[in-house]
Image: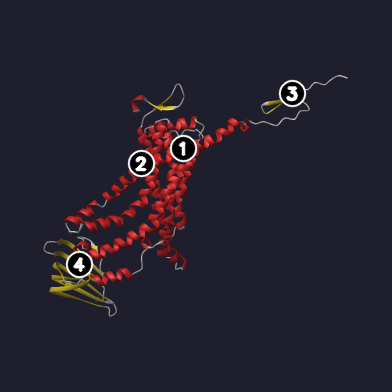
Amino acid sequence: MARRHTKPQKVGSRTSSPGVIHEKVFPDASPKAAQERPNSLKISTTLGRYLFREMIPPFVISVSFFTFIFLLTKILDITNLIVNYRAGLSSVFLMLLYLMPYFLVFVIPISVMMSVLLTFLRMSGDNETLAIKAGGISLYQLIPPVFVFCLIGCLLTGGMTLYGLPWGKVSLKQLTLKLATSTFSIGLKERTFNEHVKDVMLYVNQVDLKNNALRDVFIQDQRTKDLVITIVSPKGQLFRTSGKSVIHLKLLNGTVNQVDIQKRSANTVHFDTYEVRLDLEQAMKKAKRRIRNEKEMYLSELLQYVWKGPEKDSQYYKVLLELNRKFSIPMACFVFGLLAIPLGVQAKSARRAFGLSLGLVFFLLYYLLLSAGLVFGESGAYPPLIGMWMPNLVIGGIGCYLFVRVANDRPLQFPRIYAMLIGKKIQKSKKTGKDILTANERK
């Protein structure tokens, strides 16, 4: 009887003969692979800590820089208060402190984006991202430290929108009323309709602080029910009752027009001397008791206003916009952080300044979309939920597309875009076949 020969079967990395059962062996079951797993995890943890530490200095610098830029917009008002209106440094410092939450609401998200962008720009310029990819670590594994950093920025921004912004608005208004009570000239602006006292509108063309003299004065007084009093005078004098917050305006050689709405009558009186009394303390008490606007409300007050189910007027839509805005802007930190990764990794193929400029362009696009959402949301053209969250969806969608493209080693054509913007041509590399800038355009 002839013996039938069979070939040995190959299973895994070993051979098996008939009648002998061998355990199937995979490469991952080797002791070497088992040792590589904790090493890979250790490398990812170390890399995550390194990346997180690298993002802190750019964040601090960006917050300081952008806050300084925002404060420059108020430098003229601050100088005017100190030089012309003799406001104390403590009052000016408090005003800046109350304005800081409004600045930080926008400064923190853009600082998060710039810190992530600058970190990856530096790593890309030093070929660190190339070394990370060569070590078997994909771009997806760099997301956790970036998102942890974005989470910190989100919490800080959320603290500003939920607590800092209403606190700053209310405190600034109280400080302004207090300053107006102590020194009326601070609240009295030239060529501006001043309405610091309720139902009284005051317009002064010129104010002489040394002599407390007023020129070209226009006053509309509606403190009496169904009676509108309009006073016009070429000059006047400002007096203050000692120990009281009562301001007296002594007007000279003017006219008084009185309109009685109920009786439908009007009369005009010419005067040589006319005195108007303004009680600032009473006005301050009324201002504290009045209903806050949507930007002065805390989260609980906004929710209470919405749950009451008032009539869907413009104020209702403003409250809904502010409620959604308090959460949409903090979430923008994640959107900008995700967008900054591909911009930083791929910007090496063009100039670094181009990557920074592109990041600022995306932030400007976000701000424009947010402004459009506020305008159309207040009018009720579309729901406030869409108006406040649409910028996050648009910029977040762009960020996801760019990130997936870069993670799959598909270039973003930055050299071509950069060349189109500067109006120059690009050439293909003979070695790699990639688009590169000409020699006279590279640094």
Q: Cα distance, mark 3 to mark 4?
A: 108 Å
Taking the spot 22% from the left edge, 65% from the top edge, the residue there is 180
- Across and down, in percent, residue 379 comes to 41, 60
First in sequence, mark 2 or 3: give its number.
3
Residue identified by numbered label 2: 57
Q: CA distance from mark 2 to mark 1?
A: 18 Å
Of badges 2 and 1, nearer the viewer stands 1
Q: CA distance from mark 2 to mark 3?
A: 63 Å
Q: Is residue 417 visible?
A: no
Side (left or right) of 76 relative to 363 = left
Gap between marks 4 and 2, in whole Å? 54 Å
Say whether residue 311 is left or right of residue 88.
Answer: right
**As drawn, 136 above or below 316:** above
Gap between marks 3 and 1 measured at Cα: 46 Å
Q: Residues within 10 Å of mark 2 (few under 14, many from 20)?
A: few
Q: Residue furthest top?
A: 2
Q: Residues within 10 Å of mark 4 (few under 14, many from 20)?
A: some
**Do residues under tags 4 and 1 come within 8 Å of each other at their CB atoms?**
no
Instruction: Give the vertical position of 265 relative to 194 (above or below).
Output: below
Q: Are marks 4 and 2 in contact (CB under 8 Å)?
A: no
Q: Residue at x 49, y 37 (%)?
A: 44
SS at mark 1 in the image = helix
* The C terminus, quarter of image: top left
